[in-house]
Image: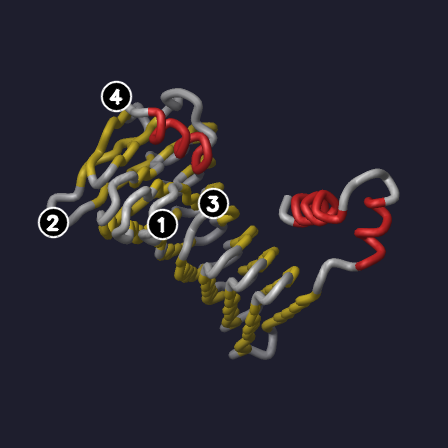
């Protein structure tokens, strides 16, 4: 049975208010709390290391997989390996994410390594949310690694979200695309206090007609630090776009490193980066409507990160 802390975290990272429909594996403090499979989606535990294999049959559509993680034990540090084998002509939603509640003095850390093998003409939407809470002095640390291998005509949309409570994160995403494959990434990130966040993306466009669009929106507050490092490698007739749009506040620091590598005359690659403070006229406009300066700032930030 899930306790109230676990239920609260599951709401934050997976929008779960009850046991989800379809296939799922809920992990709590290093162990599988509950699991369900369907006729088209099978989940099995790895035998050689911690983690699971998720196998989705050809032609599976309008189904979902939830694999959230809850850590509420101070001092727990784990690395979990999850592999997704998605057949051909599928259309599925995969919801992951991890929440840490640390009320102790020791650091709590979850490192998740996810690999996606996406079959021909399949589509996936992958949602990964990170969240931290707890009044302990121990840190809440999350270091996800995501690898995607898209076969011909495959499409993947990634929503990578971290808004609150994570002290340190080092996110690595690597993708390799075959002919006519598409990858879309939408990252939303906010740091505060002394938090540290690095997001690194490397996308190889290997097949003719492949394309990617990697966009990050972030807010850095207080004394926090962020680094956005995005690299697109065009090896053939392809198109790629990467963008960092960030709001900086207080004494925060932001480093944007957009990178393009064209190894073909037919590669069309674009990068954009913008970092700045909240515009004074935006604050003034909202304050004339009756909001305080703090309320106006929050309204602007919430709209920016939607």
Disc sitting over residue 48 in the figure: 2
Given residues 260 and 187, the one toward you in this image is 187
Secondary structure under badge 4?
loop
The residue carrying mark 3 is 121
Marks 2 and 4 close (CB-CB < 8 Å): no
Left or right of residue 26: residue 62 = right
Disc sitting over residue 116 in the figure: 1
- Give the distance between the C-alpha atoms of the residues marked 1 and 2, in whole angstroms: 19 Å
Mark in the foreground, 4 or 1: 4
Upstream in sequence: badge 1 or badge 2: 2
Secondary structure under badge 1?
strand
Q: Which quadrant holds the N terminus?
A: top left
Residue 103 is at least partly visible in this image: yes
The residue carrying mark 4 is 1
The 10 Å Cα crowd at callout 2, few under 14, some 14 to 19, many 20 or more, is few
Upstream in sequence: badge 4 or badge 1: 4
Residue drawn 33% across the image and 44% down it: 102
Q: Whole-percent x and y of residue 231?
A: 51, 70
Mark in the foreground, 3 or 4: 4
In the displayed orientation, state which residue is furthest to the left: 48
Marks 3 and 4 close (CB-CB < 8 Å): no
The 10 Å Cα crowd at callout 1, few under 14, some 14 to 19, many 20 or more, is some
Residue 158 is at least partly visible in this image: no
């Amino acid at each position: 049975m899930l306790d109230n802390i676990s239920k609260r975290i599951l709401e934050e990272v997976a929008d779960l208010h009850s046991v989800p429909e379809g296939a799922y594996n809920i992990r709590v403090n290093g162990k599988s709390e509950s699991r369900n499979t369907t006729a088209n989606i099978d989940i099995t535990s790895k035998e050689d290391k911690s983690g699971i294999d998720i196998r989705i049959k050809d032609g599976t559509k309008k189904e979902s997989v939830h694999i959230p993680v809850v850590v509420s034990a101070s001092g727990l540090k784990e690395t979990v390996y999850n592999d997704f084998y998605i057949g051909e002509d599928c259309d599925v939603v995969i919801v992951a994410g991890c929440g840490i509640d640390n009320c102790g003095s020791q650091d709590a850390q979850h490192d998740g390594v996810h690999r996606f093998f996406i079959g021909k003409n399949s589509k996936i939407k992958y949602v990964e949310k990170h969240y931290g809470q707890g009044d302990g002095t121990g840190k809440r640390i999350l270091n996800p690694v995501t690898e995607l291998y898209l076969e011909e005509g495959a499409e993947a949309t990634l929503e990578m979200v971290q808004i609150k409570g994570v002290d340190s994160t080092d996110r690595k995403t690597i993708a390799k695309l075959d002919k006519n494959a598409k990858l879309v990434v939408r990252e939303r990130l906010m740091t505060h206090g002394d938090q540290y966040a690095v997001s690194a993306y490397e996308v190889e466009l290997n097949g003719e007609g492949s394309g990617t669009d990697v966009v990050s929106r972030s807010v850095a507050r207080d004394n926090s630090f962020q680094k956005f490092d995005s690299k697109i490698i065009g090896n053939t007739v392809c198109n790629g776009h990467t963008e960092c749009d960030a709001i900086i506040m207080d004494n925060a620091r932001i480093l944007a490193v957009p990178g393009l590598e064209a190894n073909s005359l037919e590669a069309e690659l674009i990068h954009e980066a913008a970092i700045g403070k909240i515009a004074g006229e935006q604050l003034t406009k909202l304050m004339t409507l009756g909001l305080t300066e703090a309320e106006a700032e929050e309204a602007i930030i919430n709209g920016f990160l939607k």
